[in-house]
Image (cartoon, helix red, strand yellow):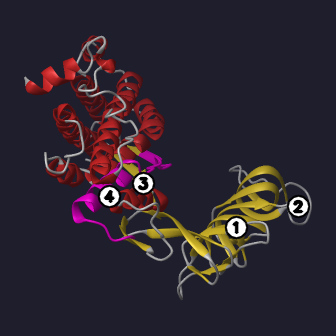
């Protein structure tokens, strides 16, 4: 009752003129917090987590609705799902329909998914900016206090040559001195191609280099998405390089190896961003939560193989529908399975002492927001697990 009373008071007409009210400039789900210091960092963490968690409900609802409709879930059940006023209940209803529809068409058959699990990217600069607010300084010098990427790869911007450890390849967005696996873009000419060519493809000995499967085996005037084997890239490589990734006079390279010149960390991919400037433990925890909430988790491209379904038509339909929607489900699952613990950490930091600089009237509103975020994340994790289980089970 106290939380609801405060929330209603903050939205009454004329409340924006009352300095005692908790307004959008003080705290808003998904907003940017103006307050500096540790209290401001705590509020920002709650705003970031609650905003992303709420949006995930909408995204998952869209994906499950699409699957249920395209896989011919009963119309009456579709109407019932859509009529839910509570957004969590609506999402769960649509995902339950999707799970049932997948199982109905799958029958006793099997579904194989070929894809690389989504790897989320956490921003180093966002972490440094947050740590600076924790310490009350103007900035956090990330070169003097280099972060690490535990369990993943730390991407840097290198002004020289970037090389991998012995026997490994280096991710490269620049000029590769060896063979490139990924995308290679021509610069004023053509590139050797062993994959999909976005441009003009020609065979090395003249004629057409386009193969029956649509790939290019020859030279590509444009961008070649290399498949296998790795190919020489006389241009800009965006992928893996088995030698060194070299900067030019005009631009640095982005890579995840060892740089022999000046460099700046950019992001942590597929791991946990650690280190940086030393700050108070609770504020550091809030920074981790905020940065991870805002991490970019791109849905992976995937290939679905369906066999032994109830009919050939069902196999084709399942393949198309799952390839169009399952990537988003997998990305949401990867993001939120790792955020459950962070929500608990942030919730534990929302105390009267920690928020001494915050308007007292805002504290219940903030507490309600992190509680809602915890529930949003919990139901998202459950629903994504159900959908992925229906596909792989």
Residue to which mark 4 is pinned: 288
Identify the image quadrant of the N terminus.
top left
Please report whichever mark, 4 or 2, sits nearer to the chain's N-terminal start.
Answer: 2
Residue 118, disc: 3
Q: Earlier in the sequence, mark 1 or mark 4?
A: 1
Residue 220 percent across, percent down from the top left:
81, 58
Residue 174: mark in rendering: 1
Q: Residue at x 45, y 66 (%)?
A: 140
Please tell me whether mark 1 or mark 3 is closer to you in this view.
1
Residue 324 magenta-highlighted: no
Label located before the other in sequence (1 or 3)? 3
Nearest to viewer (mark 3 / mark 4): 4
Question: Which stretch did the figure color magenta?
Answer: 276-305
Distance of label 3 from label 2 (alpha carbons): 34 Å
Does the residue at mark 1 contact the one at mark 4 (Cβ under 8 Å)?
Answer: no
Query: Pointer 4: residues within 10 angstroms few (<14), some, or many (20+)?
Result: many
In the drawing, does residue 128 fall left or right of residue 14?
A: right
331 and 339: which one is in front?
Answer: 339
x then y, percent, for residue 368: 18, 33
Dividing the picture into quarters, in which one does residue 235 lie? Answer: bottom right
For residue 189, which numbered disc appears in the image?
2
């Amino acid at each position: 009752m106290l939380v609801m009373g405060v929330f209603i008071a903050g939205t009454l007409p004329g409340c924006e003129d009352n300095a005692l009210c908790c307004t959008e400039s003080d705290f808003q789900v998904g907003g940017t917090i103006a307050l500096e210091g540790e209290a401001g960092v705590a509020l920002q963490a709650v705003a970031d987590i609650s905003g992303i968690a709420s949006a995930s409900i909408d995204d998952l609802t869209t994906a499950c609705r699409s699957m249920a409709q395209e896989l011919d879930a009963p119309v009456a059940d579709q109407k019932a799902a859509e009529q839910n006023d509570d957004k969590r209940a609506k999402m769960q209803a649509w995902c339950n329909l999707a799970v049932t529809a997948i199982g109905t068409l799958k029958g006793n058959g099997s579904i194989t998914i070929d894809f690389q699990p989504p790897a989320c990217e956490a921003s180093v600069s966002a972490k440094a900016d947050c740590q600076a607010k924790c310490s009350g300084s103007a900035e956090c010098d990330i070169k003097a206090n280099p972060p690490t990427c535990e369990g993943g790869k730390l991407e840097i911007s290198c002004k020289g040559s970037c090389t991998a450890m012995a026997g490994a390849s280096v991710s490269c967005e620049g000029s590769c001195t060896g063979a490139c696996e990924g995308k290679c873009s021509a610069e004023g000419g053509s590139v050797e191609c062993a994959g999909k060519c976005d441009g003009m493809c020609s065979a090395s000995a003249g004629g057409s280099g386009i193969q029956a499967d649509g790939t290019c085996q020859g030279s590509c005037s444009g961008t070649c998405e290399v498949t296998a084997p790795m190919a020489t890239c006389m241009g800009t490589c965006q992928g893996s390089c088995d030698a060194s990734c070299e900067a030019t006079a005009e631009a640095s390279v982005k890579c995840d190896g060892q740089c022999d010149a000046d460099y700046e960390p950019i992001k942590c991919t597929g791991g946990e961003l650690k280190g940086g400037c030393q700050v108070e433990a609770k504020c550091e925890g809030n920074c981790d939560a905020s940065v991870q909430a805002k991490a970019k988790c791109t849905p992976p491209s995937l290939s679905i193989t369906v066999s032994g379904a109830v009919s050939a038509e069902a196999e084709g339909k399942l393949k198309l529908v799952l390839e169009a929607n399952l990537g988003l489900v997998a990305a949401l699952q990867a993001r939120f399975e790792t955020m459950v613990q962070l929500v608990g950490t942030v919730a534990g930091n929302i105390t009267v002492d920690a928020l001494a600089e915050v308007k007292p009237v805002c504290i219940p509103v903030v507490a309600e927001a992190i509680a809602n975020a915890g529930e949003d994340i919990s139901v998202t994790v459950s629903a994504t697990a159900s959908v992925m289980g229906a596909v792989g089970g």
